[in-house]
Amino acid sequence: MIENSFHDFKMTALDGKLIDFSIYKGKKVMVVNTASRCRYTPQYEELQELHERHGSKLAVLGFPANNFGNQEPGPNQEIAGFCKMNYSVTFQMFEKIDVTTHPLYQWLSDPAKNGWNDQAPSWNFCKYLIDENGNLLKFYAASVNPLFVVDSIF
């Protein structure tokens, strides 16, 4: 039994604004746990490309986390500056969270909540694909290029 939908969540963006995930109804969503000092950090470039190319049909959401290898130690303001300066990120970034305990990531990785998936992030830049109705479609490991994920759905 699914406890709630992806669209039921509300979270705080890097700029301090509360984002109600119901605004993503009707779009696919890619959820990515990010880090600034990871070997996968260059994926920010592909994530930005997806946002620019498919933004009308796909929302890219970045969730900085310091859970793996101490690769995101800075505060939210530093993370925002890094993303803007190094990768010109304009897709929605959220405040830093703990992806091992946050309710969103519990929903993403608990089959009793999301309907099927039990895979939690094992490293930075793991990707979850959500459909237009708020259902979890797929999980992709950190090493999977974000462009591959979207090429498989569009």
Image: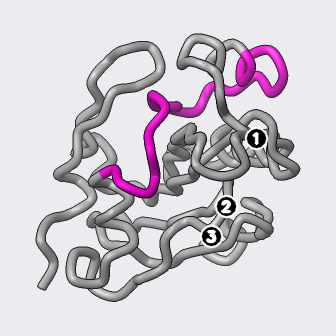
- Closer to viewer: mark 1 or mark 3: 1
Q: Is residue 134 left or right of residue 70?
A: left
Q: Quadrant of the C terminus?
A: bottom right
In this view, the residue in front, 49 or 84, is: 84
User: Few, some or many C-alpha atoms within 10 Å of disc 2 (few <14, some 14-19, many ≥20)?
Assistant: some
Q: CA distance from mark 2 to mark 3?
A: 26 Å
Q: Position of residue 12 (x, y in %)?
A: 33, 27
Q: Residue 50: horizontal and vertical position, in percent?
A: 69, 48
**Going 36% across and 14% down the picture, which residue do you hit?**
16
Q: Is residue 130 left or right of residue 91?
A: left
Q: Earlier in the sequence, mark 1 or mark 3?
A: 1
Q: Which mark is drawn over residue 44?
A: 1
Extreme residue toward the front, this view: 70
Residue shown at 41% from the left, 25% from the top: 13
| Secondary element at image label 1 | helix
Instruction: Please give the residue where the numbered disc 2 appears in the rendered image.
Output: 123
Whether residue 109 appears in magenta in the rendering, the answer is no
Single out the mark in the foreground, 1 or 2. Answer: 2
Labels 2 and 3: the sequence-earlier one: 2
Q: Is residue 85 magenta?
A: yes
Q: Disc 1, disc 3: CB below 8 Å?
A: no
Q: In the rendered structure, which segment of residues is drawn in magenta?
A: 82-102
Instruction: Tell us which disc is closer to us: 2 or 3.
Output: 2
Query: What colour scheme does the image use?
Result: one colour
User: What residue is shown with label 3?
Assistant: 154
Q: Are marks 2 and 3 in contact (CB under 8 Å)?
A: no
